[in-house]
Amino acid sequence: MKKIMSIIREYPAAAALCVAADALVTIRFTRLSAASDPTAMTYFIALYGAFMGVLIFSAGLARASAKAEEKAAQKRRERRRNAIYAMREREFYNIRTNP
């Protein structure tokens, strides 16, 4: 439950979509279960689990994408920093060898 709540806090749009789909499924299968159909409740439970699974899966993909993007940005910063260090080193070397 903690995992689901943290996903809902981090990705409110995905959670809202899941809740809307869940509401539609609930309305649809509540009518069927009112007729005391045990199969309808089985479908309801299965679909509810599927919606929660989709929510967790989409949140996991979004998190992995964000981590990959942050890693790429970190590499760009590191390359830029290394290029600046190399440029400063070349300038220093040129000053010392060509007075």
Image (cartoon, rainbow, N blue to C red):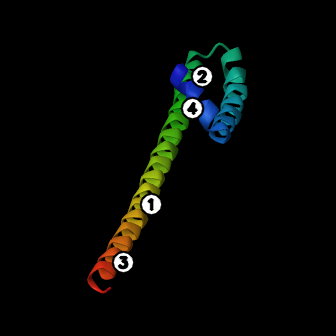
Residue 86 vs 30, above or below: the answer is below
How crowded is the residue under tag 3: few (<14 C-alpha within 10 Å), some, or many (20+)? few
Is 99 left, or right, of 31 in this rendering? left
Identify the mark at residue 38; answer none if there is no mark.
Answer: none
Q: Which badge, 2 or 4, comes first in the chain's sequence?
A: 4
Tell me the crowding category of disc 1: few under 14, some 14 to 19, or many 20 or more residues within 10 angstroms, Cα based: few
Q: Relative to 65, does residue 28 appear above or below in the rendering? A: above
Q: Are marks 3 and 2 in contact (CB under 8 Å)?
A: no
Name the residue beneath numbered marker 1: 77
Judged by depth in the image, the label closer to the viewer, 3 or 2, is: 3
Circle 2 — which element? Answer: helix
Compare residues 79 and 98 and report the one nearer the observer. 98
Q: Position of residue 5 (x, y in %)?
A: 59, 25
Q: Residue at x 36, y 65 (%)?
A: 82
Along the line of sight, which residue is nearer the eye, 89 or 41? 89
First in residue order: circle 3 vs circle 1:
1
> Can see residue 48?
no
Q: Secondary structure at mark 1?
A: helix
Distance between the alpha carbons at the discs numbered 1 and 4: 29 Å
Disc 2 to disc 4: CB gap under 8 Å: no
Look at mark 3 in the image and give the residue it sits on. Answer: 91
Label 4 crowd (10 A; few <14 / some 14-19 / many >=20): some
* Amino acid type shown at disc 4: Ile
Q: Residue furthest front?
A: 99
Residue at the disc numbered 4: 7
Q: Is 70 above or below relative to 76? A: above
Where does label 2 land, which residue?
40
Total marks shown come to 4
Instruction: Give, as a three-letter code, the residue at label 1.
Output: Arg
Q: Earlier in the sequence, mark 2 or mark 1?
A: 2
